[in-house]
Amino acid sequence: MLFDSLALFSALVVLLLLRQLVNVYPSVMACLWRGKECFNLEASVKLAHDRDIIAMAMVIPFCLVVYRFRLYHPVFLDGFGNNALLGMYFAVFSGYALFRLAVFALFRPKTLSSKTLAVSRKVAYTFFIFLTLLLLAMGGIMCRLGLDDSVVRSAMLWVSAVVYTLFLLRKLQIFNSSCSVFAAFLYLCALEMIPTGILIVSAIVF
């Protein structure tokens, strides 16, 4: 019941924001192929604002997809009922997002320009929008084809890994625009590998 209510709510929100989504979508796609487009998107106040709004709107559908196909399911979640489990997925997502902010505040590269820092921080929103839309499309198509949930889950995890790798490459390029490749790699490890590594380890160990 809760799942269906949230799905309906998120669908209505996306419909209300459809104009902003259509407006920002070409820039989101452009950022996948060229690191420079990440700077161009951030330079446009309207596009950046629309991107931020759409990214927030994607949180609910993303968590619903993760819950529906158990893309993240450590053992400690086994004892929860359906509604409580769905709530835990939102809690894990919120915890991961807050931990990323804490890591950024702790390891914030002080040698980089404020513009580069802003672009590097917000590029995650851009890729999050793309990933969520892609997972929603995959879930709809693959379920329509009658594929087993385990197959859908495996495909989604692989696609998520590819998108995240591309995100890391773009973020490395953004850092590299203001520092050496070696320094950019160190920044990337500190700001991305730590929070994501802990998330992956929690799924495997716990």
Image: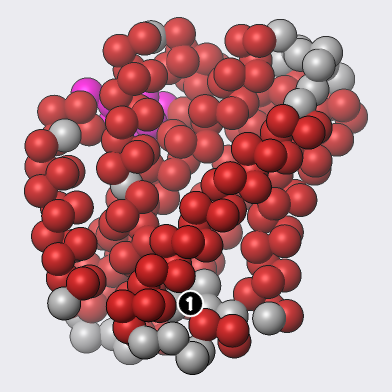
- Residue 11 rendering spot, x and y as whole percentages: 14, 52
Q: Considering depth in this image, is 70 or 146 the residue closer to the camera?
A: 70
- Residue 50 rendering spot, x and y as whole percentages: 29, 24
Q: Where 30 sits versus 61, above or below?
A: above
Q: Residue at x 66, y 10 (%)?
A: 114
Q: Secondary structure at mark 1?
A: helix
- Residue 156 rendering spot, x and y as whole percentages: 44, 68
In the picture, the quarter occupied by the C terminus is bottom right
Q: Residue tagged by mark 1?
A: 154
Q: Where 71 sits versus 29, above or below?
A: below
Q: Residue furthest right?
A: 182
Q: Considering depth in this image, is 174 or 10 the residue closer to the camera?
A: 10
Task: Tell me which colouring the rendered structure shows.
Answer: secondary structure
Q: Residue at x 22, y 85 (%)?
A: 146
Residue 155 at least partly seen: no
Q: Is residue 161 left or right of residue 27?
A: right
Disc 1 crowd rating (10 Å Cα; few below 14, some 14-19, many 20+) is: few
Q: Residue at x 47, y 28 (%)?
A: 31
Residue 192 is one of the magenta-drawn residues = no
Q: Residue at x 80, y 41 (%)?
A: 190
Start-end of magenta stretch: 22-30
Q: Main secondary structure of the magenta part?
A: helix
Q: Is residue 120 left or right of residue 151?
A: right
**Identity of the amino acid at label 1?**
Ser
Residue 180 at least partly seen: yes
